[in-house]
Image (cartoon, rainbow, N blue to C red):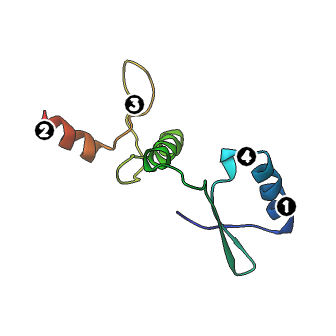
């Protein structure tokens, strides 16, 4: 997970969002040389994977390796969830 550099006003906004329990603030931040990591306490592993999966789908990157996905599903018109390499690997397994 990459660190996002933030300033004082962004830090205040992050704390405000934490108070309303927004999932959008989950992540790692860098403020004046301090690393601030925000995550849910006792979050189950599958919930963390689901959040990562959802974020990668929204960004259009492969859920396994993080490469940019370029091909779209012809039926749905949405980007595939896997890159060409990983799609070919899963197709060979079947």
For disc 3, the neighbor class at 10 Å (few under 14, some 14 to 19, many from 20) is: few
Please give the name of the residue rendered at 61% of the width and 67% of the height, measured from the top-left corner.
3
**Disc 1 secondary structure class:** helix
Left or right for 51, reference 64: right
Q: Earlier in the sequence, mark 1 or mark 4?
A: 1
**Disc 4 secondary structure class:** loop
Residue depth check, mark 4 versus mark 2: number of the one nearer the observer:
4
**Residue lying furthest top in this view?**
75
Task: Decide which of 44, 36 is in the foreground and name it.
Answer: 44
Q: Earlier in the sequence, mark 1 or mark 3?
A: 1
Residue 46 vertical position relative to residue 14 in the rendered view, above or below: above
Q: How many angstroms separate mark 4 from mark 3 (CA)?
A: 34 Å
For disc 4, the neighbor class at 10 Å (few under 14, some 14 to 19, many from 20) is: few
Residue 62's mark? none
Residue depth check, mark 1 versus mark 4: number of the one nearer the observer:
4
Please give the name of the residue rendered at 53% of the width and 39% of the height, measured from the top-left corner.
58
Residue depth check, mark 3 versus mark 2: number of the one nearer the observer:
2
Q: Earlier in the sequence, mark 4 or mark 2?
A: 4
Quadrant of residue 83 within the rendered picture? top left
**In the rendered image, which residue does mark 2 sit on?**
92
**In the rendered image, which residue does mark 3 sit on?**
72
- What quarter of the picture does the C terminus occupy? top left
**Residue lying furthest front in this view?**
42
Residue 33 image position (x, y, % from top left): 70, 81
**In the rendered image, which residue does mark 1 sit on?**
12
**Total numbered labels:** 4
**Disc 2 secondary structure class:** helix
Q: Earlier in the sequence, mark 4 or mark 3?
A: 4
Residue 61 image position (x, y, % from top left): 44, 46
**In the rendered image, which residue does mark 4 sit on?**
21
For disc 2, the neighbor class at 10 Å (few under 14, some 14 to 19, many from 20) is: few
């Amino acid at each position: 997970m990459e660190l996002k550099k933030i300033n004082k006003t962004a830090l205040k906004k992050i704390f405000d969002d934490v108070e309303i329990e927004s999932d959008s603030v989950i992540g790692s931040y860098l403020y004046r040389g301090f690393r601030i990591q925000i995550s849910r306490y006792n979050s189950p592993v599958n919930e963390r994977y689901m959040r990562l999966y959802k974020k990668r789908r929204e960004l259009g990157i492969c859920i396994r390796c993080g490469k940019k996905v370029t091909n779209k599903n012809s039926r749905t018109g949405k980007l595939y969830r896997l890159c060409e390499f990983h799609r070919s690997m899963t197709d060979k397994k079947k």
